[in-house]
Image: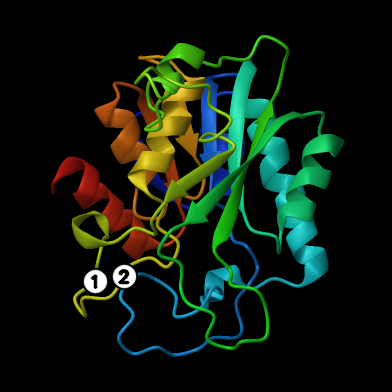
Amino acid sequence: MKINTIYNGDCLDVMSRRIDKGSVNLIFADPPYNLSGHSLDLANNTTGGAFYKVNAEWDVYSQDDYIAFTHQWMDLCHDLLTENGSIYISCTQHNIGEILTTGKELGFKLNNVITWYKTNAMPNITKRTFTHSTEFVCWFVKGKNWKFEYDTVKHLNPHKTKDGNYKQMRDFLDFIELPVVQGRERIKGDDNRAAHPTQKPERLIELIVAASSNEGDLVLDPFFGTGTTGFVAAKMNRNWIGIEKNKHYAELAHKRIFGE
């Protein structure tokens, strides 16, 4: 097993053959949401998908195949985690049912469902639904003695009491206000458009890493994309492993983290 490295391959294969069981302290997973197939084309949009749906080949499954895939990768994650390990899974209302059901089937304990409110979400162009401005992160734990660095995370809450003291986290960690990635943080292609449609904010990953790991711990991301998890983990003195099936994304992540 290599650490602080990117495996360019299928996560099912890499997790089953290349990573030691019981070795991972924290997993952040941003799996396909199975939303592709429909899109709206907004020519001037540069922050990912033109709508709330991704439109990418890697995000297309039949319902049966998606349920089977979800069970496969979450089962492997369960095996790789330490006995007090945590897994945070990003999702939307479209696939949260599969995530929650599978987690319970595998024996995970659900601690929280965190709501990420996207302060700069795409407007409601179709006028047929409420604006899609939130995503969720499900926090599951494997055993009873999970890590949660309460005081560390409390100091990351930007909201303060009237006296300027640090607050309880109910107004922040269960409901996080963060913009969709933009500006210098956004990894862009040669066409100046977002290189990956679902790049997550570094701040979101920082909160998760701070909450459920310590320096020197091992963090795994089985859907590495452009490498936000590895980039943040390295900055916070954690070891990390990234798995990315798409060669182009893996190359972008490598350049982002290693500068080459």
Q: Indicate the quadrant where residue 113 lies.
A: top right
Q: Position of residue 19 (x, y in %)?
A: 52, 30
Look at the image and tell me whether residue 81 can be seen: no
- In the image as oriented, which residue stretches furthest toward the top? 145
Residue beneath the point at 62% across and 37% down: 16
- The colour scheme is rainbow
Q: Nearer the viewer, residue 153 or 168?
A: 168
Q: What residue does disc 2 label? A: 194
Look at the image and tell me whether residue 33 can be seen: yes
Instruction: Verify CB contact (< 8 Å) between mark 2 and mark 1.
Output: yes
Residue beneath the point at 34% across and 48% down: 227
Q: Position of residue 222 (x, y in %)?
A: 52, 44
SS type, badge 2: loop
Horizontally, residue 70 falls left or right of residue 232, namely: right
**Quarter of the figure that contains the N terminus:** top left
On residue 189, the disc is 1
